[in-house]
Image (cartoon, coloured by chain):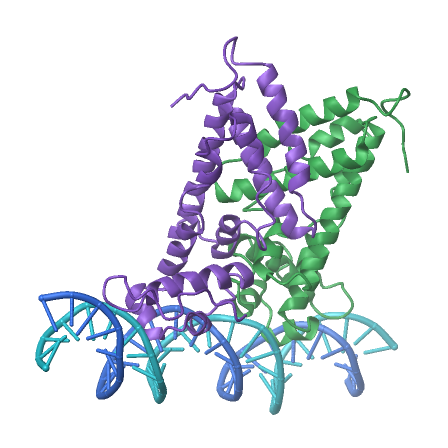
Chain colours: A purple, B green, C blue, D cyan
Amino acid sequence: MAAMTELEKGPTGRRRGRGARERILSASQHLFREQGINQTGMDQLCAAAQVSKRTAYQHFAGKDELIAEYLQQVDPTVMSSIFDSQELTAREKLLAVFDMPPTNPMCPYISAAVELHDPDHPAALYAKEYKETVTAKLANAAREAGAANPEELGEQLALLLDGAAARTRVVNSNAFPTAGTIAVMLIDSAIAAGPSNDNHRETVSR
Amino acid sequence: MAAMTELEKGPTGRRRGRGARERILSASQHLFREQGINQTGMDQLCAAAQVSKRTAYQHFAGKDELIAEYLQQVDPTVMSSIFDSQELTAREKLLAVFDMPPTNPMCPYISAAVELHDPDHPAALYAKEYKETVTAKLANAAREAGAANPEELGEQLALLLDGAAARTRVVNSNAFPTAGTIAVMLIDSAIAAGPSNDNHRETVSR
DNA sequence: TGTTAAGTACACCGACCTGTGTGCATAACA
DNA sequence: TGTTATGCACACAGGTCGGTGTACTTAACA
């Protein structure tokens, strides 16, 4: 509602104008997540961003392009607060991803892929790319933690994440704790099986 | 394409008319799954079902009602071919659910919940109900298999299922084998921990 | 054969959607 | 201060959507 961020008057500093683009993307974060992409019209979005429709279409070639940029702005660093943390051990990183939510309605990447329903849509391609990046980061942390098969563990944990997100949406209870429980089992089992002999942490493998 | 079922001329036997309702629901199974619910208009659906639009709206109060009935017809028995099987042990039942797909694009229940985006939509309520039924059946089979905590194992396996479905959609590779691998671990671990002492099969708990 | 329920053909409505065209205001920078 | 990119207000085009009204044919059953 009245919590329309603080850039209402625009940052006044970007380039020349009054930062309409930022407001549009900011509004899309709210509306696309809370109402869905298809349920949010450009008129409503422009009104919420306090931007004229004409301006919106000067910044974005069309709604599809806006959707793609919206999705890219959801988490541009791909959970770097977890994976680039200096304070967490690799094992703690693997578990931290299950403590993030309850984000709003659901993982925006799955939502976008389902709502757009076109695997070739730029946003759908980015969603896939994002998921693959997360999986790779999980695999890296798994390797660092000394897992027997880091790629496999990464894929498994990624699946748990997606399962928790999807299930939380359909059924109406937080499924992340359950996913976390399974994750602990998988991680401990994989680490117990070990990579062979040596270190279990501080093996920065890349 | 030309594979428009076999009831083109209608079953000729139902009640009086020519079975338009069945054709509509049959067409919705194809179109809603392959194109999505929002992307499928009533005009297209009626054309595919070879039914006049007027007739469609005499059978269904509106698109929402049609969606709900479509979803209820996807799997009315809730995987009874697995759970009511006489030939499968309880443990085999728990694993069999991961061998079903690759169904078309994705679990229709998750799709519906995401696409409709209204938790109170009749179809969304049914999706939730369906998922809860599956979870309960998994828990039953888990108890029958002698799992330490059947409810927990049921919830865990259900989460794996949803994760595999969602992930298969976003990333573009079949995630069910990975889910199955995790399932084996969880099941064996839960059974090893045992309910206490007695039987590991043929305990028809309901 | 006649009655009646079921289905048909097709034009049409209002709402909403993405996207434009145009003329005007204004903030930023030189 | 003047220039120019940036943004605004607003009407409107063209399309699609869900849903309806009307007058008709046809299939089922008595």
Is residue A152 depicted above or below B157 in this figure?
A: above
Residue A24: x, y in percent? Answer: 39, 65
Quick one: quadrant of the C terminus of chain A? top left
Residue D2: x, y in percent? Answer: 8, 80
User: Seen in the image, is A149 located left or right of residue C21?
Assistant: right
Is residue C25 depicted above or below A10 in this figure?
A: below
User: Seen in the image, is A113 located left or right of residue B30?
Assistant: left
Which of A53 and A23 lies nearest the eye of the viewer? Answer: A23
User: Seen in the image, is A8 located left or right of residue B26?
Assistant: left
User: Seen in the image, is B171 located left or right of residue B111?
Assistant: left
Total residue callouts: 0
Question: Can you name the residue that lies furthest to the top here?
Answer: A197
Residue A20 sits in which quadrant?
A: bottom left
Which of B101 and A92 lies nearest the eye of the viewer? Answer: A92
Q: Is residue B10 visible?
A: no
Q: Is residue A106 visible?
A: yes
Residue A46: x, y in percent? Answer: 41, 71
Q: Give the residue drawn at x 58%, y 18%.
A: A191
